[in-house]
Image (cartoon, rainbow, N blue to C red):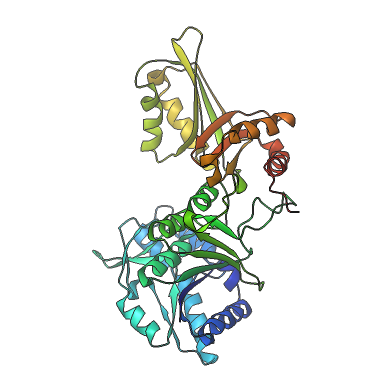
Amino acid sequence: MACIVMKFGGTSVADIERIRHVATRVKREVDAGHSVAVVVSAMAGATNQLVENVRSAARLYDLREYDAIVSSGENVTAGLLSVILQDMGVAARSWQGWQIPIVTDEAHGSARILEIRSEELRHRLENGEVAVVAGFQGLEPNRNRITTLGRGGSDTSAVALAAALKADRCDIYTDVDGVYTSDPRIVKGARKLDRVTYEEMLEMASQGAKVLQTRSVEMAMKHHVPVQVRSTFEERPGTLVVDEEEIVEKAVVSGVTYSRDEAKITLRNVPDRPGVAASIFGPLADSAINVDMIVQNISPDTKTTDMTFTVSRSDLDRAVGVLESRRDELGYADLSAEEDVVKVSVIGVGMRSHAGVAQQMFQALASRGINIQVITTSEIKVSVLIEEAFLELALRSLHTAYGLDAT
């Protein structure tokens, strides 16, 4: 008998019929003799509506009350799934985050899980009861208040629960049937990966792939929880996310991803002196603006420098405002900002032992007349910033260049 955690996202539980379909999947695992815990999201669109309700109620609102309101969508789904399972003859009960409890820090709206006290839950599972857990939520014990984990937090709830229960596997059910080598809506030759490493999945998630939430992958990697991404609506194996040691043949490049959430800022003729980078990026950090790609050019006279970097599009106006308010202090001659850029990344653990991966990327883009604006690298990733108009051409060209096209 295995212990399995099953997580179902909003599209999987969008209405009663879909929740009933989820229940049949859960019952199948129970009938196979497995011990099952289920983590559910709110029904599709429910959380967005709750957030909108809060914002309509007050311009400045208490984040503790915000969490109490927006977490209620998951409670509804958990209760409905439990009722349907019971109607099918399956012993089941719903659990809210505070009832387990899933203990978090005090960061309302984006709390981090500190501990899951799973003794009672484990006892119920061992006695054949299905635990249907409301995802996305926890408990801040000092003030006994409900917290939420941020958007996509149900994935994190599921992986954390799997780690606490020492589950054999955590299955993430969604509207796609696995992790692909690229976006199949753009790259027709994209193919599903049977296995991918935690490191690769973490890079893919952080570079724009929407299959798994970044924090859930970090937690799975930390606790060595095998994660399988599967389709709720199709009967086929998904993609396993596992330790690198469990993959025998490691591809040089496993995937090509992209992120449209990019904006580029360039500061020209900044005085080149010690501490100039800190004087630029420190105020941005103080304003909770995350900077991603950075490139610095030294001018011919070595007295000034040009600094180019990227921020998320949603932060662009705030970032420009912060920098313009410090123009006299920073001493730059000109500031320009662009939104018509995208980040394209090639990812693969095989890069560690293969030279020339970046050169192959640059050559493939150059052959298509695509200019590279900014470059960043890590041990298993190369990312470039290009003009948004060339996104689809870049993805297809790189996918072919690295031999990823389905045969």
Numbered marks: total: 0
- Would you place residue 1 above or below residue 162 in this image? below
| Residue in view at x 70 percent, y 54 percent | 184
The image quarter containing residue 399 is top right
The image quarter in which residue 218 lies: bottom left
Foreground residue among 182 and 75: 182
Q: Position of residue 293 (x, y in %)?
A: 50, 34
Q: Which image quadrant: the C terminus?
A: bottom right
Residue 136 in view, yes or no: no
Residue 136, horizontal then vertical, whole percent = 44, 65
Nearer the observer, 319 or 285 = 285
Picture coordinates of residue 63 (x, y %)?
37, 57
The x and y percentages for residue 233 are: 65, 72
Residue situated furthest top in the rendering:
301
Q: Identify the residue at image location x=47%, y=80%.
A: 79
Residue most extreme to the left: 142
Q: Is residue 282 left or right of residue 255?
A: left
Residue in view at x 38 percent, y 88 percent: 127
Q: Is residue 286 visible?
A: yes
The N terminus, quarter of image: bottom left
